[in-house]
Image: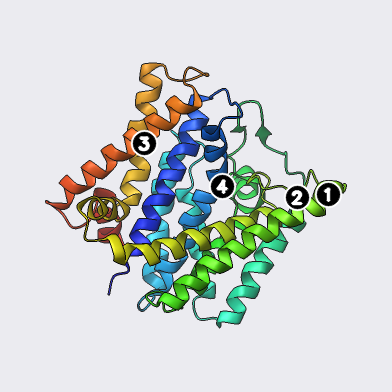
Amino acid sequence: MRLHGLDLARFMAFFGMVLVNFRIVADVNWDTSITTRLIDTTEGRAAALFVVLAGIGMSLGRPDHWRILKRAAVLFCLGMLNQLIFPADIIHYYALYFIVGVAFLNQSSARLIMGSIGITLVGMVLFLVFDFDRGWNWETLEYTDFWSLSGFIRNSIFNGFHPIFPWASFLVIGLWIGRLELSRNSVQMSLIIGGLIITVFTYVLDTVWIANTEWAEMFTFAPIPPNPLYVLTATGSALFVLGCALWITPKIENFGITQSILKAGRISLTLYFAHILVGMGLMETMGWVDGYLSPLQLAGYSVAFCIGCVAFAVIWSRIHTRGPLEWVLFKLS
């Protein structure tokens, strides 16, 4: 039985990534408005939810190690091509997470939890031992030696946009979640409540303790550099959104608009590339960059683009059961 709530969660993650990535391209001048704060909230959390969902997908059914590795190879090639256009690409990192995930597929649930914690702590150790700034031009957000072997390895392992350490921990958490009976109401409520508890705990921890210590600059909610506090709060938000999506979908999926959104969630790989090639491409063509848009205008454009994506998904679903890139991935892997 297909869990349609995962499709809804996938679309929500996609919408969050659209907001964040369009913000990068638009270089919006931020203010203290509610719109700005909402967009800030999605930074690093939408992408983390995507990775958790990838882990869930890996663990459902009967995972085939060889097929997963072939999918990783295809995604790596797609991601590296996308890297030429969009330096903040996450797809080639996905391929690396999948390789890590294969090593955990047959591990016990307890080892999955410990593995996720271990990956996060290794990321923290690498941050403390090595120079996180190496290779970065922070003014332009460019990684100067990405296309060299040493630069690529460094970027992939610990100081890129979404490095293996600690980002692969989200995928391992997804592997654990995928073993739960996600169709059960009690499990969905546990995800919602657990996610809320983790999120509140991290904010209290930051406010009461970390903010008043010398660790304040190191332990933040920002995804760059990704520290344990960020991983914890992003995990909490992912659990909460996932639980809500799984719980609400059976209650609203008979509505036409919900069906349309679910269809968009099923072709998220295609839509991810579309938001770069079409969405960002239109912004640059129209000159909506370098602070041209206000936060509210950026949010409006993001919503309009996502509505267009839903419309495309509905039309495409009448012809094919898989999205264009989903079909390519299926055939090649």
Disc 3 crowd rating (10 Å Cα; few below 14, some 14-19, many 20+) is some
Badges 2 and 4: C-beta atoms under 8 Å apart?
A: no
Mark 1 to mark 2 CA distance (whole Å): 6 Å
Counting residues from the start of the chain, the first of labels 2 and 4 encountered is 4
Residue at the spot of label 4: 44
Which residue is identified by label 3? 303
- Give how far apart the Cα atoms at labels 2 and 4 are: 15 Å
Specify the amino acid type for callout 2.
Answer: Phe
The residue type indicated by label 3 comes to: Val
**Distance between the alpha carbons at the discs numbered 4 and 3:** 19 Å
Residue at far left of view = 319
Q: Secondary structure at mark 2?
A: loop
The local secondary structure at tag 1 comes to loop
Residue with the mark numbered 2: 219
For the residues bearing labels 4 and 3, Cβ distance under 8 angstroms: no
Residue at horizontal 62 percent and vertical 33 percent from the top: 144
Label 1 with label 3: CB-CB less than 8 Å = no
The image shows residue 82 at horizontal and vertical percentages of 42, 40
Which of the marked residues, 4 or 3, is nearer the chain's N terminus? 4
Disc 3 versus disc 2: nearer the observer = 3
Mark 4 crowd level (few <14, some 14–19, many ≥20, 10 Å Cα): many
| Measured Cα–Cα span from mark 1 to mark 4 | 20 Å
Name the residue beneath numbered marker 1.
215
Pointers 1 and 2 in contact (C-beta within 8 Å): yes
Residue 165 in view, yes or no = no
